[in-house]
Every structure is written in C-alpha cells, then in structure tokens.
Image (cartoon, grey):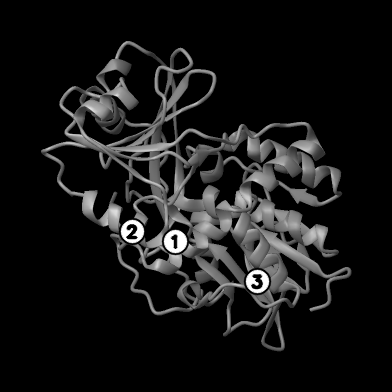
C-alpha cells in the first residue's frame, strides 16, 4: 500500500490504537480512530505504567525481544511528545524490586536470574538486610529481593493526554462513542467498517486495536480472535514523596510510586467478563497484600479505586499483524498487562507494515491466526 493518502480505520482509541494512528499520520497516511467510549479511558488509562515485562521468564524469548525493542523507543518518544505538546508523561527510571518471602507459592529467583543473565539485564541479588536498606517500606519478614535498577515507569494517563493532544494537533480524526458493528468486505477484502448507527467508512486498511472488545468484534466479522477481558482493580494511596523508592512487584500485588507521593497498588486478575466496578473482596485482598509485603504503607490515605479490562490472550502474547484470511484487515490486540510497555514498538511495526514495509523483527510468534486454544480460563501466566 502506498503511504500517501492511504485511509486507515483504527478501531480502538487506547494507547496502541492512538500511537499507531499517530505514526501512520506521520508517514503520510490518513487514519481515523473509532472509539466505543472515550479516547484512552479503558485499559490504557487504568494500568500502572510499569515499563518492564511482567515475569518475562514465564514467556517465550520472542516476547522479551519485542519488549526490549519497545523500551529503546521510550526515551525519544517521551521527548518527542513533550516537545510537541508541552505535556510530560513523567517517564523516569525508578527501578523494580521483587521481594522474596519464604512462604512464596512460586519461587521466581532462579528463573529470573537466568533470564536476566541470558538477556543482559542488570540485576542485583539482595539479602534481607540489603533488601530493607534498598526499600525500607518492606516487611521485616522479607527473605531477600531481586532489584533491576534500570527499570522505568511512565504516568500512563499523562502519556495518553499527550498522545491525544499530538493527534489533535496533527489533524487526526477521532470519533468517540463510535461502536463498530461489522467489517465491510468486497472481493474478499476488508474495505471499511459499518457502525451500529448505520454509518459506513471506507478504507484501504482496517486495524483492529479494540483491546478487550477485539474478540467479540472479530467473531461478528467472521474470524476467530481469542481475546477476552481480564479485569484488574487498583487502589491509589496518597503519601509523601520517597516513602516508596522503587516499583515493588510481588505475585500478590505490585506497588508503583509516583514522584508526587501517590502509590498505585494493583492489581486483581479476574475472569468475570465485562462485569465492572470495584469489589470489597478484591480491594480487601490488595490491602491485605499491602500489610504483608509493605506494612510501612499501612498509615497512608486511600485516595480512590478504579478498574479496567485488560485484553488477555490464551498464551499471554499479543496478536500483531495482518489477518491472512481477510486481506486489508490488521490486528494489534491481546497485549494483556503489557500494553503500555509494548505500545511504541507495536505502533512502529504495525504502521510501517500496513504501509508496505516489512517488520524488522520476526513476528511469527504473534500472528493473529496462530494456533492457540481459547478457553474460559485464559492460559496466560497467572501472576
């Protein structure tokens, strides 16, 4: 497909859809974003902005390579957006610490160290005293910790705000409350979309980046894409800056310190369909995990709670690339807990791929039509 003037309908206005549309526009295409709700207010907004693969030793190596390619893009991305919009996404390296307890259900130490050595990630193995010195908020019961000092974070709502401004300034059409009903086909190709209000939009290509809603839309359009919602609840604490020094990630909960003293405590992983809202049981579980892992946070104020639906896939990997059985249709969905960290590389690869440039990475493990088994309980690593 030639770049100049190519019309691309992007279904989904989360961080993946928005960033890909922005890159498409920069390459001369004419994207239009269709969002069923508000731009950037679903899973992308609800997450914690951790710029690290979550337990990558549980995934195939291709996943790590994709994440690493994305992480190399973040410094220049945040500078570019801040220069264009004046909005800082608060990207910085806070480090990531995994505390280890003697009663942990899963022992991550050896596989994590092996993974770090294989991919050259700087990691420090800490005993109890060193762990408490590095992170005084931890429980005295901690048996040790693993610390990756180079891991960063981004304040994802601010990143999305900057993206929205950049898209608007670039003249990209963004349509909210736009529910796509089905794809339009002609001569065996996807040639546009039809919305529930009957409006039709013709396009040279269609990108399905609708997060947790991608699977249902694919089914309505006649092909299988096993993406399902995985609900995640988060509690926000208000404290003084520096009360927590690193991102702390345990199987029971994670804790993400913002520069202003706020701390995100997350997140549940619930296979409950699209049943929204915060629940007593899950909020209680997160607070109990806080008391166990980081009891020195227990006097902080609870500011608010929220939730989002992550787009899970059976093998935990995203679906990226063209749908071979339906030319003209592309997919960028199923990122599960890694949407923010993978958004830059997804946008670079998919935008260029749609416009005719072959990807620089082996994308075979992420093919939309790869052989994965869908079930009521997704096959992603549970924690």
Q: Which residue is mark 1?
A: 64
Q: Is residue 123 visible?
A: yes
Say which of marks 2 and 1 sits in front.
2
Asked if 218 appears above or below 281 in the picture, the reply is below
Q: Which residue is mark 2?
A: 115
Give the residue displayed 64% in from the left and 38% down from the top: 159
Question: Helix, strand, or loop for circle 3?
Answer: strand
Q: Which residue is mark 3?
A: 183
**Disc 2 crowd, CA 10 A, few/some/many (<14, 14-19, 20+):** some
Q: Is residue 192 visible?
A: no
- Mark 2 vs mark 1, CA separation in Å: 10 Å
Question: Helix, strand, or loop for circle 1?
Answer: helix
x, y percent for residue 184 = 69, 74
**Disc 3 crowd, CA 10 A, few/some/many (<14, 14-19, 20+):** many
- Mark 3 vs mark 1, CA separation in Å: 33 Å
Q: Earlier in the sequence, mark 3 or mark 1?
A: 1
x, y percent for residue 3 = 83, 71
């Amino acid at each position: 497909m030639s770049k100049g003037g190519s019309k691309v309908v992007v279904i989904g206005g989360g961080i993946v859809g928005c960033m890909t549309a922005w890159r498409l526009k920069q390459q001369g295409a004419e994207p239009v974003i269709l969002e069923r709700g508000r731009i950037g207010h679903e899973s992308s907004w609800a997450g914690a902005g951790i710029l690290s693969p979550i337990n990558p030793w549980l995934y195939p190596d291709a996943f790590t390579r994709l994440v690493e390619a994305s992480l190399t893009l973040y410094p220049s991305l945040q500078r570019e957006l801040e220069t264009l919009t004046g909005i800082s996404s608060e990207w910085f390296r806070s480090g990531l610490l995994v505390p280890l307890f003697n009663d942990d259900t899963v022992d991550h130490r050896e596989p994590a160290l092996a993974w770090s050595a294989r991919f050259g990630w700087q990691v420090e193995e800490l005993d109890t005293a060193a762990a408490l010195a590095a992170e005084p908020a931890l429980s005295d019961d901690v048996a040790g910790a693993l610390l990756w000092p180079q891991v960063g974070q981004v304040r994802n709502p601010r990143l999305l705000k900057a993206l929205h401004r950049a898209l608007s300034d670039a003249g990209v059409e963004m349509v909210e409350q736009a529910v796509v009903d089905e794809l339009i086909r002609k001569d065996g190709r996807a040639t546009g979309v039809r919305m529930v209000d009957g409006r039709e939009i013709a396009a040279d290509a269609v990108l399905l980046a609708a997060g947790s809603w991608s699977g249902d839309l694919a089914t309505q359009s006649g092909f299988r894409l096993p993406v399902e919602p995985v609900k995640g609840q988060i509690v926000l604490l208000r404290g003084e800056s520096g009360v927590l020094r690193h991102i702390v990630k345990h199987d029971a909960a994670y804790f993400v310190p913002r520069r202003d003293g706020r701390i995100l405590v997350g997140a549940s992983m619930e296979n409950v369909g699209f049943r929204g809202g915060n629940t007593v049981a899950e909020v209680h579980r997160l607070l109990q995990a806080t008391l166990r892992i980081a009891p020195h946070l227990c006097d902080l104020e609870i500011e608010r709670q929220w939730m989002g639906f992550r787009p899970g896939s059976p093998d935990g990997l995203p679906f990226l690339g063209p749908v071979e059985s339906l030319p003209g249709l592309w997919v960028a969905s199923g990122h599960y807990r890694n949407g923010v960290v993978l958004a830059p590389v997804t946008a670079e690869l998919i935008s260029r791929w749609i416009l005719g440039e072959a990807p620089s990475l082996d994308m075979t493990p992420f093919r939309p039509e790869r052989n994965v088994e869908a079930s009521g309980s997704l096959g992603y690593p549970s924690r």
